[in-house]
Image (cartoon, grey):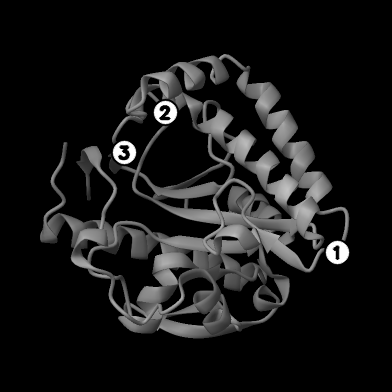
């Protein structure tokens, strides 16, 4: 286990900032709309940069913007420094969203040492897809998303879960061929975008507003900018409503025991 002391954490954040700047450069050049989200957005609003104990960075795009981004990465991404991964282009990759990573680095999350792909320092890029507006249908849709996410996660859960029964269940789920899970996920993506739904979410990540299972699409349709670590990044125009919906009183610091970082078994920075 690697202890992320203050210096290592700050060096990690600066690499993630470099990744954010590369994403921003590509998006502005190619007319792609994105927004920083989650703790990264809270940090921009509350701290003007990273939350001091935060060890990751999160970005969201509506599905059409995400697909355009992953396409233009083939030619626009600075391949001497960065690489892009998602479930469509990386064998063994079991996350339903993309990661932009820094070459010549390593950020090995605990219990993911056996995953068969490069694991450089990264930022997460969450595509947001439509969800049904009828609550019962949205509830069932969420169960569907959760099941696929657990099957993806099974490669990690069969090792990391503290409960013996769950490790057995994850081991059984992990026997489902990866290509079949990805085919099914791709069909869910297609189905979730057949209609112009007014609610969206990252299908393979739990919604932060709990039982609502979606966010207003209108929040994501227009952008403004906020300063983050001395640079201007795109944020959704409805960022205040989003943060209130997802976190409640987001301006109040959480208790010290809730200021957690992700355990890492190995780390290599520039």
The crowd level at tag 2 (other Cα within 10 Å; few <14, some 14-19, many 20+) is: many
- Res. 31 in view: yes
Residue 109: mark in rendering: 3
| First in residue order: circle 3 vs circle 2 | 3
Residue drawn at the location 64% of the way across and 55% of the way down:
72
| First in residue order: circle 1 vs circle 2 | 2
| First in residue order: circle 1 vs circle 3 | 3
Q: CA distance from mark 1 to mark 3?
A: 37 Å
Quick one: SS at disc 3?
strand
The crowd level at tag 3 (other Cα within 10 Å; few <14, some 14-19, many 20+) is: some
Quick one: SS at disc 2?
helix
| In the displayed structure image, the side of residue 3 where residue 183 appears, left or right | right
| Quarter residue 17 falls in | bottom left
Q: Does residue 42 lie above or below 19 as drawn? A: below
| In the displayed structure image, the side of residue 97 where residue 226 appears, left or right | left
Q: Which residue is mark 2?
A: 156
Q: Quadrant of the N terminus?
A: top left
Q: Which residue is mark 1?
A: 196
């Amino acid at each position: 286990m690697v202890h992320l002391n203050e210096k290592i954490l700050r060096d990690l954040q600066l690499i993630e900032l470099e990744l954010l700047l590369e994403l921003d450069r590509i998006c502005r050049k190619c007319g792609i709309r994105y927004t920083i989200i989650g703790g990264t957005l809270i940090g921009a609003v509350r701290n003007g940069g990273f939350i001091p104990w935060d060890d990751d960075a999160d970005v969201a795009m509506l599905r059409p913007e995400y697909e355009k981004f992953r396409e233009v990465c083939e030619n626009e991404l600075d391949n001497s420094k960065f690489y892009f991964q998602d479930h469509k282009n990386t064998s063994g990759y079991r996350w339903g969203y993309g990661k932009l990573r820094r070459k010549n680095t390593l950020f090995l999350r605990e219990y993911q040492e056996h995953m068969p792909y490069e694991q450089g320092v990264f930022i997460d890029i969450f595509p947001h897809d439509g969800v049904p507006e009828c609550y019962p249908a949205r509830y069932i849709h969420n169960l569907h998303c959760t099941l696929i996410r657990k099957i993806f996660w099974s490669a990690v859960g069969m090792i990391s879960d503290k409960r013996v029964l769950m490790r057995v269940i994850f081991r059984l789920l992990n026997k489902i061929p990866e290509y079949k899970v990805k085919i099914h996920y791709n069909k869910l993506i297609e189905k979730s975008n057949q209609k112009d739904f007014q609610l969206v979410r990252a299908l393979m990540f739990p919604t932060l507003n709990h039982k609502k299972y979606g966010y207003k699409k209108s929040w994501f349709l227009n952008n403004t900018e906020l300063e983050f670590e001395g640079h201007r990044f795109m944020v959704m125009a409805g960022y205040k409503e989003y943060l209130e919906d997802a976190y409640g009183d987001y301006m109040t610091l959480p208790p010290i025991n809730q200021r957690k970082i992700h355990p890492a078994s190995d780390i290599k920075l520039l």
